[in-house]
Image (cartoon, rainbow, N blue to C red):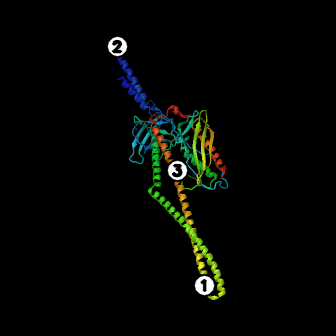
């Protein structure tokens, strides 16, 4: 009699435990699935869907709002994978909403995050041609954006180095050195020959004056002595004209040389100014790139921020986790 | 055995909560809300080149800055600006000075244009002073005008502006930032118009 009572107590306890287990399983698996839901389609083309499965969570602003109902890998690679989402009908999914795959770093389990990008947009109900459910566009996850920023940073740094290399290339250095050497040689020759040239011009001027005086005297004499000496006077005048023409030519040559030196000087000044601007801009890009890389390194040195988000104390006014 | 089970359960629960709910980030655009009236004739005789604004490392981030106590700064975690403040400020300065027509032409430094003058700007401070609600946005900018021909510093000034934030959050800070920057550009334009040309 006593052993039968113990069996009854054990049996009753087992039945109660099974009922509790069944109730728990029912509660965990889908008691809330009976709530009305809306279905949406997403075509994922750019993001990896590793870890995504039927039943994976669909979240909006961090709150679970639905689940992945189905997926299909399309034969058309341009359209990628079609994923069917089942979202609680009370959740406002608006026109312009984006869907991104969010993966837990440690477990690798993936879910889908929904984000409404436009404030006060109408609810997403439009059915594109050939679609059974409204289509949510694919977004870009934070991690991809950060990778893109780092790539841009690397490209900018590389471009800056290339610009410096081009600026300081051997050809440019040789060209600038050659130009400077030519200018120096030209200026030196001009400076060296300037006294001699000035002396020549002075002597020519004095000779011309004497010849003019001689010419006047000869003309007077010729007038006095007769026509036979007229030829001599004419020859003297021709000689005088020749000397004048020579002097004019020398003056023109000097003027042309001065103009060419002026143009060369202007060209050099412009080249130096633009090179200086390029150097200023390039050095600033290099400094900024270095600082940005330091910041990125600091951010990567704090993995807990990536895993758990910012600490409560770091949140700004009006912000909450 | 029990200890191992407890440790395993804690690790499992910790892993499940790694990517908890987070607030979505909002991106704000820094804008000049003012305009400049163009004079009949440029005040300065030559082109102005604008060098990109220098900024401390703290402000080389798109996250908006705030301060809850004097001598401290922090970054909003979920509020960002669409462009880094320093290059954006240089861009808005160029647009405002082009409107004002103080110079025959205005171009960025390094754009292949020769200019007679150069404007250097340094962003010293730009944050939401949130010690009291709703707070105000403070902007401190150092500006200098250089004559490039003989590398002569013509004038230098500090422009400090403050504008109230309509609300004690990032949205209010963004609106206050636009107002403070607009004031600073007004004062910069007036300053350039009254520098004596020697």
Marks 2, 1 in one chain: yes
Which marked residue is nearer to the observer: mark 2 or mark 1?
Answer: 1
Residue B35 x/y as whole percent: 64, 48
Residue B104 x/y as whole percent: 62, 55
Label 1 neighbourhood size at 10 Å, few (<14), some (14-19), many (20+)? some
Q: CA distance from mark 3 to mark 2?
A: 93 Å
Q: Which residue is mark 1?
A: A232
Decide which of B33, A62 is in the foreground and name it: B33
Q: CA distance from mark 3 to mark 1?
A: 74 Å
Q: Which residue is mark 3?
A: A281
Quadrant of the drawing holding the N terminus of chain A: top left
Q: Which of marks 1 and 2 precedes in the sequence? A: 2
- Residue A33 lies in what quarter of the image? top left
Report the chain holding disc 3: A
Q: Which of marks 1 and 3 precedes in the sequence? A: 1
Examine the rendering and report whether any part of residue A136 can be seen. no
Decide which of B5, A182 is in the foreground and name it: A182
Count numbered badges in the picture.
Answer: 3
């Amino acid at each position: 009699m006593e052993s039968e009572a113990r069996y009854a107590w054990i049996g009753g306890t087992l039945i109660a435990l099974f009922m509790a287990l069944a109730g728990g399983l029912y509660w965990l698996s889908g008691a809330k699935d009976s709530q009305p839901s809306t279905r949406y389609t997403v075509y994922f083309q750019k993001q990896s869907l590793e870890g995504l499965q039927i039943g994976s969570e669909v979240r909006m602003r961090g709150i679970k709002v639905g689940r992945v109902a189905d997926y299909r890998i399309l034969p058309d690679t341009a359209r990628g994978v079609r994923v069917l989402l089942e979202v609680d009908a009370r959740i406002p999914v608006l026109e312009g909403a984006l869907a991104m795959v969010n993966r837990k770093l440690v477990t690798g389990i993936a879910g889908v995050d929904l984000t409404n990008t436009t404030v006060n947009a109408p609810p997403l109900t439009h059915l594109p041609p050939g679609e059974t459910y409204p289509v949510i566009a694919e977004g870009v996850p934070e991690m991809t954006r950060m990778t893109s920023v780092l790539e841009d940073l690397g490209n900018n740094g590389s471009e800056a180095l290339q610009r410096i290399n081009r600026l300081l290339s051997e050809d440019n250095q040789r060209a600038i050195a050659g130009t400077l050497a030519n200018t120096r040689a030209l200026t030196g020759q001009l400076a060296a020959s300037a006294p001699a040239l000035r002396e020549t011009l002075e002597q020519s001027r004095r000779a011309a004056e004497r010849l003019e005086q001689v010419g006047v005297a000869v003309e007077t004499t010729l007038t006095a002595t007769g026509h036979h000496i007229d030829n001599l006077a004419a020859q003297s005048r021709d000689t005088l004209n020749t000397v004048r023409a020579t002097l004019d030519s020398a003056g023109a040559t000097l003027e042309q040389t001065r103009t060419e030196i002026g143009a060369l000087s202007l060209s050099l000044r412009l080249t130096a100014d633009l090179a200086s601007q390029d150097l200023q801009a390039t050095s600033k890009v290099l400094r900024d790139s270095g600082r940005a890389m330091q910041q990125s390194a600091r951010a990567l040195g704090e993995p807990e921020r990536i895993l758990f988000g910012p600490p409560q104390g770091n949140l700004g006014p009006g912000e909450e986790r | 055995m029990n200890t191992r089970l407890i440790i395993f359960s804690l690790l499992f629960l910790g892993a499940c909560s790694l990517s908890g709910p987070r607030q979505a980030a909002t991106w704000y655009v820094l804008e000049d809300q003012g305009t400049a009236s163009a004079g009949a004739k440029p005040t300065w005789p030559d082109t102005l080149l604008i060098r990109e604004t220098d900024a401390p490392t703290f402000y080389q981030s798109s996250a908006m800055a705030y301060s809850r106590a004097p001598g401290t700064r922090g970054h909003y975690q979920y509020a960002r600006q669409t462009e880094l403040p320093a290059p954006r400020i240089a861009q808005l300065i160029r647009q405002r000075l082009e409107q004002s027509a103080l110079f025959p032409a205005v171009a960025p430094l390094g754009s292949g244009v020769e200019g007679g003058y150069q404007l250097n700007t340094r962003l010293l401070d730009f944050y939401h002073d949130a010690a009291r609600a709703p707070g105000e946005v403070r902007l401190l900018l150092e500006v200098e005008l250089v004559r490039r021909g003989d590398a002569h510093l013509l004038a230098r000034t500090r422009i400090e502006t403050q504008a109230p934030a309509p609300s004690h959050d990032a949205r209010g800070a963004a609106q206050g930032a636009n107002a403070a920057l607009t004031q600073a550009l007004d004062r910069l334009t007036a300053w350039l118009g009254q520098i004596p040309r020697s």
